[in-house]
Image (spheres, grey):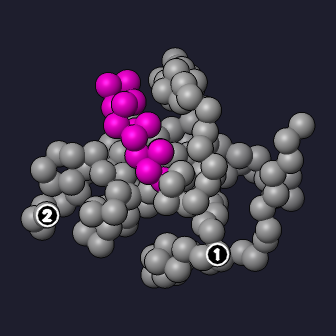
Amino acid sequence: MNESAPVVRPARPEDLPRLVELIHEHIAYERSAPRPPGLAARLGPQLFAAQPRQWVLLAETPAGAVAGYAACSAEFAFWDARHHLHMDCLYLADGARGHGLGRALMEGVAALAREQGLEHVEWQTPDWNEGAIRFYDRLGASGLAKRRYAWPV
């Protein structure tokens, strides 16, 4: 990769196949269970609706290849009685790490929060993902100790 500035932009409908590839890579990277088929068909209408409530930013290498994404939505915090931007996922393909794309994505997420009138961003990362934890610490983010639960109903 050369030293050109990375490009971060909103996902477009034609990006959906590559985004789904990256999501499946991310699922495998986080050692998560495979998801049911049809992800693109479920995801597309959510991301590209007239008034979307979810946003995806894509990171491109200087050569123009989509190499990562950040997926966000607004979330309401009752204790603060305010919305914030929840970053559900941030992922960079293996060969794209360490070249400034992660920082560029995080700057894009911060800009998205400001654009939506939201004062802060929250996210989580697995406690075993030491590289991500170091990256977020270098950004100046603070970690909050909590355990995440999932409850099928």
- Does residue 52 sit above or below 59 in this rendering? above
Numbered mark located on residue 127 in the image: 1
Image location of residue 37, percent across then percent down: 56, 28
Q: Looking at this rendering, what residue extends furthest in the right direction? A: 153
Residue at 15 percent of width and 54 percent of height: 62
Relative to 5, say whether 33 is above or below: above
Residue at (51%, 38%) from the top-left corner? 55
The percent position of residue 58, horizontal first and vertical second, equals 36, 45
User: What kind of element bears circle 1?
Assistant: loop
Q: Position of residue 64 (x, y in %)?
A: 17, 45
User: Is residue 85 one of those drawn in magenta?
Assistant: no
- Indicate the amino acid at tag 2: Met
Residue at figure coordinates x 62%, y 32% from the top left: 36
User: Residue 1 got which mark?
Assistant: 2
Q: Which residues are magenta?
A: 12-26
Would you identify the image quadrant in which residue 94 lies? bottom left
Q: Amino acid at mark 1?
A: Asp
Return the residue nearer the eye: 57 or 43. Answer: 43
**Left or right for 66, reference 112:** left
Decide whether the magenta segment is chiefly helix, strand or loop: helix
Q: Which residue appears at 60% of the width and 76% of the height? A: 128
Q: If the image is split into quadrants, where does the N terminus sit?
A: bottom left
Disc 2 crowd rating (10 Å Cα; few below 14, some 14-19, many 20+) is few
Q: Give the distance between the C-alpha atoms of the residues marked 1 and 2, in whole angstroms.
A: 30 Å
